[in-house]
Image (tube, helix red, strand yellow):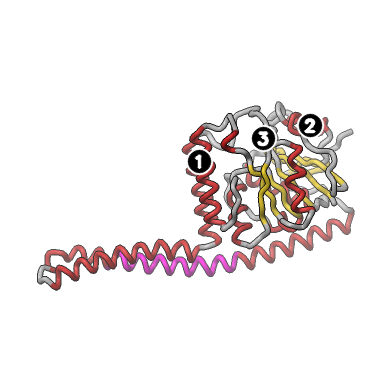
Amino acid sequence: MKLIIQIPCYNEANTLEIALNDLPKQIDGIDTIEYLIINDGSRDNTVEVAKRWGVHYVVNFKNNKGLAKGFLAGLDAAVRNGADIIVNTDADNQYSGEDIEKLVRPIIEGKSDIVIGERPIDQTEHFSPLKKKLQHFGSWVVRRASKTNIPDAPSGFRAFSREAAMRMNVVNEYTYTLETIVQAGRNKMAITSVPINTNPELRKSRLFNSMFGYVKKSMLTIVRAFIMYRPLKFFTMAGAVSIFIGAGIGVRFTYFWLRGTGNGHIQSLILASMMIVVGVQTIVVGLQGDIIAANRKLLEDIQYRVKRLDYEMTEKSDGHTDVVKDDVNKADNK
């Protein structure tokens, strides 16, 4: 069984070697461990540090494309190079490398396809009280949207089986962490979490410039993912609210009309009609969205089958591939 540990990198020359040194060299049940970095348009010597250390594969983007695209490119490169399990971790050494064994164990034992590391958020010193509350709230929202029990949704420390990696799709450009959980939960994939430890902070997070920006982007990502996978439920609830308000206003107008004073409340009748029409139209949009969502599932299944055939052909040809995104190659560590 082969494990590839991938690390998304953007100008990580100062911390990458520390993170790499913390990674495991062997794990019971794993025959081979290899290492891969995704160089997301770094302007420093991140790639040189990685190659000098002995990283096996380097995925190069000429320009910065963001965490989500880098994550998917890493999964694709890892699977193409024969990975049975892929672990994603950070270049700032936020996560403890020795906990990788905890992450991969449920996959090795066949109990899960996706495993997410649960950080001790309340005990993390460099998290402000506000950030801790927002992390808990965001994870609760993701649990509701995905119908999973993942306690730390924003955690980027996670492991994927080969099958799960081939089924991953991320459409937003912000981050992969939230959308992939909603996708996994709604597609009934086997997903779980394990408690992990974190290391002291080496640098500030680059994922967001302010707490407000983080909350805004995270909520938009969750809502968008929920609408993609459960459009009928979302728009039916929104439409029902509009119809309920319209009906309430209509009852109020009827009351005055029965008393003979309806002429002074024509505006209420107009508003009630508008609210009911808007509600019905919203539900119709939900029905259309549900058809699109069903079509999306068919396309995802086709995409999975194409990927599987592509990877099988790659394995039969030479056992590994020098995958090309912008520039992806097997690292020359000589």
Question: SS for tag 3?
Answer: loop
* Crowd around label 2: few <14 · some 14–19 · many ≥20 (10 Å): few
Looking at the image, is mark 2 or mark 1 earlier in the sequence? 2
Please tell me which residue is depicted at 39% across the width and 64% down the height of the picture. Answer: 239
User: Which stretch appears magenta?
Assistant: 273-296
- Residue 200 spot, x, y in % from top left: 65, 29
Q: Which disc number belongs to residue 134?
A: 1
Apparent side of residue 177 relative to residue 214 in the rendered image (left or right): right
Q: Quadrant of residue 327?
A: top right
Up the image or down, 294 lies above or below 318; here it is: below
Q: Is residue 62 something one can see in this rendering?
A: no
Q: Give the residue type that dot 2 points to.
A: Asn
Apparent side of residue 267 relative to residue 315 in the rendered image (left or right): left
Q: Which residue is mark 2?
A: 21
Q: Quadrant of residue 252?
A: bottom left
Q: Which disc number belongs to residue 279?
A: none
- Residue 270 spot, x, y in % from top left: 23, 66
Q: Give the residue type that dot 3 points to.
A: Thr
User: 289 or 198: which is nearer to us?
Assistant: 198
- Residue 257 spot, x, y in % from top left: 14, 71
User: 109 or 158: which is nearer to us?
Assistant: 109
Q: CA distance from mark 2 to mark 1?
A: 32 Å
